[in-house]
Each structure stands twice: as structure tokens, then as C-alpha cells.
């Protein structure tokens, strides 16, 4: 007899200890892998969202026609490609020209905003540190032109004094020395670098979109196989609950996606009509940006407002003010009338919780985290409700019914 009892008891304690240590190490390993591959998990989530959209279209076609599932799924892909091709054919050229014009006018936009900010002491006190130097574009250009003019004058004198061969060498030397004095362009380099940082991840933006496209295609082709594979990893006693939870997640994602599509279309329409009434030349590209960024609650409208106001300053500060009022009105209508009306039929997500979760996801993974914060929150809320709060609600209901019977 030992201190811990029989040898059999000692062996069982050692087995339990090693089992617990193994489980802890396995959990730590899974957590480490998840953290290191978090960007890949976001791409998977984006692929799931695309798969939800494709299955939603396929289910509608199957409901209307009664055709086979794979045929309906193939038609959903063809319809999506046809819609994108049609939109590209109808408005693609205009959108491309307006986008190019907007990029080309970025330096002028910045300069006019800088002049307007410098002309208002109150506004300058608020945002002056962000627009410092924007109004000095013309002065910098004129200052940069002086060395070039002086260099050309010296070249002319040398051409008169020396032979043609010597003057050619001097021109080359002066040109090479004058080039470093030119200031860096204030064009679209800053904007492109911001966008690159916003959507930077493992494969780059194009690689991410490529991966999302094929993930969505494969997941939507046979969703039940993937659900069955996930459920088979659970214990036998938890498989029914796991299957029910995953089906509920898919249903809630469909509801969220429908509500988001409605919000995008309504925001696009209201913004386009308002910009046409104001008389903004780049109304189409700005309305498309405003509509698409509705996909990102809270932060999307703010991001969409920045290029719109910059375009407005090209015409006049008054136009920029009208654009600001328009976007504020559209956001007011969308957040207080459109979204609540849609959420009554679709899916309600608490605004404060969503904003907090967006900030966390943005800090963890940048732009993709902010974009996909809402569907991820929908999934987490479904899991918590089905596995935790749902049981509590059932228990409370049962206790109330028992008290009523007594």
C-alpha cells in the first residue's frame, strides 16, 4: 500500500494526469494555429458568405421550377455572371472614366480642401493637423519650377559659349542634378497605399478575391457534405444539436445577407438621386461607392463620405456642404427607417455590440476584419443562443410552467 493507495489507483491517476495535459496542449496548439492563420479563417468566412448568396439564388430557382439541385446551382452562377456582365456593359465605361477622372483630380481636391480649411479658423482648429500643407500645392509647384527655369537659362548660355558636344554633356549633368529637387507628387500614391494597407493579407487583394471566389463555388456546390463532415467530428450525443446549430447559422446568414442587399440598393438609389439633383458630375461612381460601403455598418458611410466631399470641393465649398448634408440625410434614413424595417423581417444585431466587435476585428486583422465583422458576429450570436442562452430560456419556461401547474 503506497501513499496514494494501490498501484492500480496510482496508474489511473497518472493516466488521468497525462490525459489532462494532452488535452491542454492540444487546445493550446489549436489556439496557436488559429491565431497564426486568422487571415485564412477570414477568407473562409468570406467564401461562406459567397456560398450563402449562391445557394440562396439556387434555392429560389428550385422553388420556382422544381428542377434538380445541381442544375439550379449552375443557373445561379450563370445568372450572377450575367448580371455582372450586364452591369459592366451598361455602366462599366462610365464608371471607369469617372474613377479615372476622380483619381486624376485628387491633387486639386486636396488643394481646394486645404484652402477651405485654412480660410476657417474653427475648422482649421478641428482638422488642420490632417490637412497641413494641402493648400500649398501651387506654391510648391512654382518653387519647384524655379530651379528648372534657372537650369534651362544656364544651358542656353553654355550652348552659346561652347561647342555642341560640350553643351550636350552639360545639359545631361544639369538634368540629372535637377531631378532629385522635384518634390514628390501628391497624387494617388497616398490613397493607393492606404487601400493596400486596408486590404493587405496573406495573398494580396487579388489573391484573396481569387481564393474567396473558388471557396464560395466549392462550398455552395455541396453544402451538406461539409455540414456532415463537421457534425461527424462531434460526439454522438451532440451531433443532433450541432446539426441544428449549423442549419440555424446558415438561415441567419441568409437573413442578414438579404437585409444587407436591400440596404445597399436603397442607399445607392437615394444617393444617386440626391447627387443628380445637386448636379455632381461624378454621381455614378460616388453612388456605387456609397451603396457598396453600406455592406460595412458604422464605418462604411464615413468612408464613402470622404471622396464625395472631396469631389464636391472641385466645384465649390457650397456643393461640398450640400453633399455632406445629403449623405447625413441618407445615413439618417438608412439607420433609423430602412434598417429597422428590414431587421423586423430579417435579423437584428445590437448596434453597440456590432460597433465594438468591428473595432476588435479591425485591430486584429485590418480591413477584411471590419468588412466581415457582421457575418462573424451573426455566427457567434447564433452559437451562443443555440448552445447557451437557448438552454437557459428553455429552463426558465419549464420552471414557469411548473409553477403555473402548482
Image (cartoon, grey):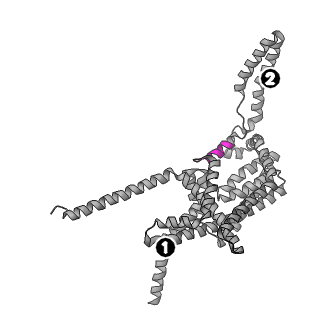
SS for callout 1: helix
Where's the N terminus, which quadrant?
bottom left
Residue 68 screen position, x and y as percent: 66, 71
Q: Which residue is located at x 63 percent, y 67 percent?
A: 254
**Does 32 sit left or right of 349 as displayed?**
left
| Count of numbered badges drawn on the protein | 2
Q: Residue 149 shows which numbered tag?
A: 2
Residue 192 screen position, x and y as percent: 68, 43
Label 1 neighbourhood size at 10 Å, few (<14), some (14-19), many (20+)? few
Residue linked to disc 1? 240
Q: Is residue 238 above or below residue 193?
A: below
Q: Which residue is located at x 74 percent, y 38 percent?
A: 135
Of marks 2 and 1, the one in the foreground: 1
Which span is picked out in magenta? 192-201
Question: Is 198 one of the magenta-colored residues?
Answer: yes
Where's the C terminus, which quadrant?
bottom left
Question: Is 210 one of the magenta-colored residues?
Answer: no
Most common SS among magenta residues:
helix
Label 2 neighbourhood size at 10 Å, few (<14), some (14-19), many (20+)? few
Q: Is residue 305 above or below residue 135?
A: below
Amino acid at each position: 500500500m503506497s501513499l496514494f493507495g494501490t498501484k492500480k489507483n496510482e496508474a489511473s491517476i497518472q493516466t488521468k494526469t497525462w490525459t489532462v495535459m494532452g488535452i491542454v496542449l492540444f487546445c493550446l496548439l489549436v489556439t496557436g494555429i488559429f491565431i497564426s492563420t486568422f487571415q485564412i479563417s477570414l477568407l473562409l468566412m468570406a467564401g461562406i458568405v459567397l456560398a450563402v448568396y449562391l445557394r440562396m439564388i439556387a434555392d429560389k430557382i428550385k422553388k420556382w421550377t422544381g428542377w434538380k439541385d445541381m442544375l439550379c446551382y449552375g443557373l445561379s452562377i450563370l445568372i450572377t455572371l450575367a448580371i455582372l456582365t450586364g452591369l459592366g456593359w451598361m455602366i462599366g465605361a462610365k464608371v471607369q472614366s469617372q474613377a479615372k477622372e476622380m483619381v486624376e483630380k485628387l491633387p486639386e481636391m486636396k488643394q481646394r480642401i486645404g484652402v477651405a480649411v485654412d480660410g476657417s479658423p474653427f475648422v482649421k482648429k478641428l482638422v488642420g493637423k490632417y490637412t497641413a500643407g494641402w493648400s500649398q500645392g501651387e506654391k510648391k509647384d512654382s518653387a519647384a519650377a524655379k530651379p528648372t527655369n534657372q537650369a534651362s537659362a544656364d544651358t542656353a548660355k553654355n550652348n552659346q559659349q561652347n561647342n555642341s558636344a560640350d553643351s550636350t554633356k552639360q545639359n545631361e549633368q544639369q538634368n540629372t542634378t535637377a531631378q532629385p529637387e522635384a518634390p514628390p507628387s501628391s497624387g494617388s500614391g497616398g490613397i493607393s497605399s492606404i487601400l493596400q494597407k486596408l486590404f493587405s493579407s496573406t495573398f494580396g487583394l487579388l489573391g484573396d478575391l481569387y481564393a474567396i471566389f473558388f471557396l464560395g463555388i466549392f462550398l455552395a456546390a455541396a453544402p451538406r457534405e461539409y455540414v456532415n463532415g463537421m457534425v461527424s467530428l462531434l460526439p454522438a450525443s451532440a451531433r443532433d444539436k450541432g446539426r441544428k446549430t449549423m442549419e440555424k447559422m446558415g438561415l441567419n446568414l441568409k437573413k442578414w445577407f438579404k437585409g444587407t442587399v436591400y440596404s445597399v440598393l436603397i442607399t445607392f438609389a437615394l444617393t444617386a438621386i440626391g447627387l443628380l439633383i445637386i448636379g455632381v458630375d461624378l454621381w455614378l461612381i460616388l453612388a456605387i461607392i456609397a451603396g457598396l460601403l453600406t455592406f460595412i455598418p458604422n464605418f462604411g458611410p464615413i468612408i464613402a463620405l470622404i471622396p464625395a466631399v472631396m469631389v464636391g470641393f472641385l466645384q465649390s465649398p457650397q456643393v461640398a456642404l450640400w453633399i455632406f448634408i445629403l449623405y447625413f440625410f441618407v445615413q439618417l434614413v438608412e439607420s433609423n427607417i430602412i434598417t429597422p424595417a428590414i431587421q423586423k423581417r430579417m435579423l437584428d444585431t445590437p448596434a453597440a455590440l456590432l460597433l465594438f466587435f468591428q473595432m476588435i476585428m479591425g485591430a486584429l486583422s485590418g480591413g477584411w476584419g471590419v468588412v466581415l465583422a457582421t457575418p462573424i458576429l451573426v455566427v457567434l450570436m447564433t452559437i451562443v443562443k443555440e448552445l447557451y442562452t437557448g438552454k437557459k430560456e428553455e429552463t426558465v419556461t419549464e420552471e414557469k410552467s411548473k409553477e403555473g401547474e402548482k
